Amino acid sequence: EVQLLESGGGLVQPGGSLRLSCAASGFNFRIYDMSWVRQAPGQGLEWISSIRGGGPETFYVDSVKGRFTISRDNSKNTLYLQMNSLRSEDTAVYYCANGLRLIEFWGQGTLVTVSS
Amino acid sequence: DVVMTQSPLSLPVTLGQPASISCRSSQGLVYSDGNTYLNWFQQRPGQSPRRLIYKVSNRDSGVPDRFSGSGSGTDFTLKISRVEAEDVGLYYCMQGTHWPLTFGGGTKVEIK
């Protein structure tokens, strides 16, 4: 059974940083592309970043480019999202998902609140 | 960016009746490999999204056969042949062909 378990969310002040983690199990993590998708309170889904399974190629939506960094540790079956220079508009539930063009399974999400 | 426009925003349906959700993209979604990366997701209240349909019309494992996807080019449709109470929630289309990947705004299915 595929499981994706996000952690690392919380309350942070504007301009602050957070690092999200996603522990994966139940599939061959190292060969899968992985993605982060967020959902602001009461809003729809927004793709924000993806990383290739077999190599370092990464992709970002313009609104987070230069502030967020996606990475992975295939030895730990873990996906990361380093978020810097956080803004109030980054407040959302952040989901980890496997896949890229064919996003398939989603984690339960972790809430990030950016507020003073 | 490719804009995904869903309609209607809200869809009240009588139990046992059919429902149809439209998704239109601002550009064609055929990728260079010949595939059309148009996916549909269901998000029940308080839950994470769940993929129902991938590449326009392929139903995921465990998804009831009352769900079907169709379409081509820029016009796509998700149909529920007979709505059940467990189908209440938000439905999103998503294109995986062009960067950035984009989602439709969502359609809320509710029971009349």
Image (cartoon, rainbow, N blue to C red):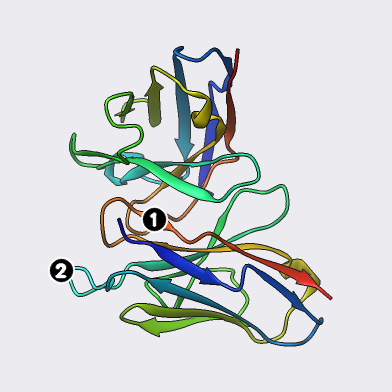
Identity of the residue drawn at 69% across and 57% down: B44
- SS for callout 2: loop
Residues at badges 1 and 2 in contact (C-beta under 8 Å)?
A: no
Q: Nearer the viewer, residue B60 or B95?
A: B95
Q: Amino acid at mark 2?
A: Ser
Identity of the residue drawn at 26% across and 59% down: B98
**Residues marked 1 and 2, same chain:** yes
Q: Amino acid at mark 1?
A: Thr
Q: Is residue A56 above or below residue A85?
A: below
Horizontal and vertical percent position of residue B55: 37, 72
Give the number of the disc on residue B32.
2
Please state if B7 lies on the left or on the right of A63 as rendered. right
Number of labelled discs? 2
Horizontal and vertical percent position of residue A104: 45, 56
Identity of the residue drawn at 74% across and 66% down: B88
Which residue is tagged 1? B102
Label 2: chain letter: B
- SS for callout 1: strand
* Residue sitting at the far left: B32
Horizontal and vertical percent position of residue B56: 40, 76
Nearest-to-viewer mark from 1 and 2: 1
Please state if B22 lies on the left or on the right of B89 as rendered. left
Identity of the residue drawn at 63% across and 39% down: A41
User: Which image quarter: residue B30?
Assistant: bottom left
Q: Nearer the viewer, residue A65 or B86?
A: A65
Q: Is residue B79 above or below residue A46?
A: below
Label 1: chain letter: B
Please state if A39 lies on the left or on the right of B70 as rendered. right
Horizontal and vertical percent position of residue A69: 31, 26
* Upstream in sequence: badge 1 or badge 2: 2
Q: Nearer the viewer, residue B98 or A109?
A: B98
